[in-house]
Amino acid sequence: MKRWFLLAGLLVAGLTVLAGCGGQVTAQEIVQHMRDTAAKTDSAHLVVTLHGQVNGDAANAMLGGTKLTDVNGNVTAELWYQKPNLLRAQIVSSSESRINGVFVVHDGTYFWAYDPQSKIAYKLDDAALRDFAGKANIPADLQDLLANPDLETMINQVLELTDVTVGPSEKVGAFQTYRLDLKPKADSPLVQVAPDLQGTLWVDQATWAPVKATVSAKQGSGGFEMTTLELNSTLPASTFQFAMPPGGHTVDLSGTVPHSVTLDQARQAAQAAGYHLLEPSYVPADATLVQVMASRGLLGQGASVNMNYSGAGGVTFWISELNGAGAAMQQAPKEMQDAGSAQTVTVRGVDGHLATHTEKGVTTALLWWKEAKTNLTVAIGGQISQAELLKIAEGLK
């Protein structure tokens, strides 16, 4: 499902093409004109081509826990926007033909992404999108841009995060432009995410609208070029209302992104999913529960609960329970998921697997098994001994 989250983020980013109204001026004057126009823009319609390249290894190192591969492609999309945060984007053409015709709608509360090939409409609420962005280590300011696509806020936050200098006047397509070069401010959260980030905007001298942009960092590069821009035209309300195409059906992702819950809420979620949440009667080194994450599951994956514990002496561990096969191992390194490299042990009367993995001098132990006569898969892992893992497992009730 990362495709849809990344697609939504890419299309929202395309809205930064909107701003402006126009001799040679300073970077600060151009920026102010952009802000003024953004503040006065109540609606917009545009056609834009976006291109991007992702360096999978560098992106995974930054995000943490992802398994992105190298990607290189382009998308031409038609977008509509209306204050305060209504958005519609339709894929006109793409280097990946299977997404042609895909469209995304933000109706003010939910993001909808429709795939015409599968005839599935994926639905995600703003809170779930923010949770997803938070787990991907995206800074809070950028999470706001994803979860609440307000044009003026978007432009202001991007500009506030960067230092801007003005370059030479250049021709871009039919537009005579000013060029603005952008780098993250020293205290910007962008520096933490991509310290080598560099961006360029080409701003139309007649309208103060950015008509082209490029951005690059070690995680990848990308940009857009605009061909159509209409500001403050009247857009029908139906533009931002999701209507299911014939034969389609909805998959609601709002509860499938793991999110923070109380322990009591996790118990209720497990009961609703048809199983009993196992909780430890023994924890080492005075460990305490510091976080509970839950997901109701998707496409047969089953409902899941993760309980994270922290204790004295640097002891940390987690317990992951999945009512279905396959996903309780999400937090484990691939080396530990390979049962061939683990030893078989008896856990709660069934065969389980016990393994360790050392990276950068830190050793993590992992124990996993499937409960007898149930569909419940359990994994316990952390920076504790294998003996402690087995003791925690046997004490689950």
Image (spheres, rainbow, N blue to C red):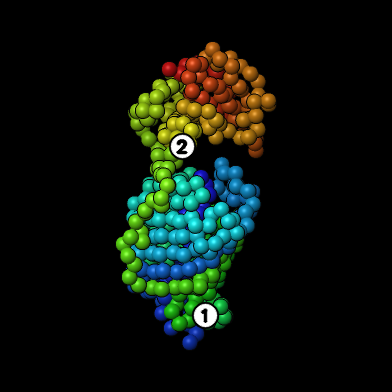
Residue 201 location (% of width, % of height): 53, 71
Q: Report the residue that reaches farthest toward the right.
A: 341
Sooner in the amino-acid sequence: mark 1 or mark 2: 1
Q: Secondary structure at mark 2?
A: loop
Q: Which mark is residue 175?
A: 1
Q: Secondary structure at mark 1?
A: strand
Q: Report the residue that reaches farthest toward the bottom.
A: 23
The CA span between labels 1 and 2 is 47 Å
Residue 237 location (% of width, % of height): 31, 62
Q: Quadrant location of the C terminus?
A: top left
Please state which of residues 161 and 340 is positioned toward the viewer in this rendering: 340
Q: Which mark is residue 68?
A: none
Tag 1: residue type? Phe
- In the rendered structure, the answer to whether residue 320 lies left or right of residue 241 reads right
Report crowding for label 1: few under 14, some 14 to 19, many 20 or more residues within 10 A (C-alpha).
some
Tag 2: residue type? Leu
Instruction: Note whether 251 is above or below 323 in the view shown.
Output: below
At x 63% / y 48%, what residue is drawn? 69
- In the rendered structure, the answer to whether residue 172 lies left or right of residue 275 reads right
Residue 119 location (% of width, % of height): 46, 48
Q: Which residue is mark 2?
A: 298
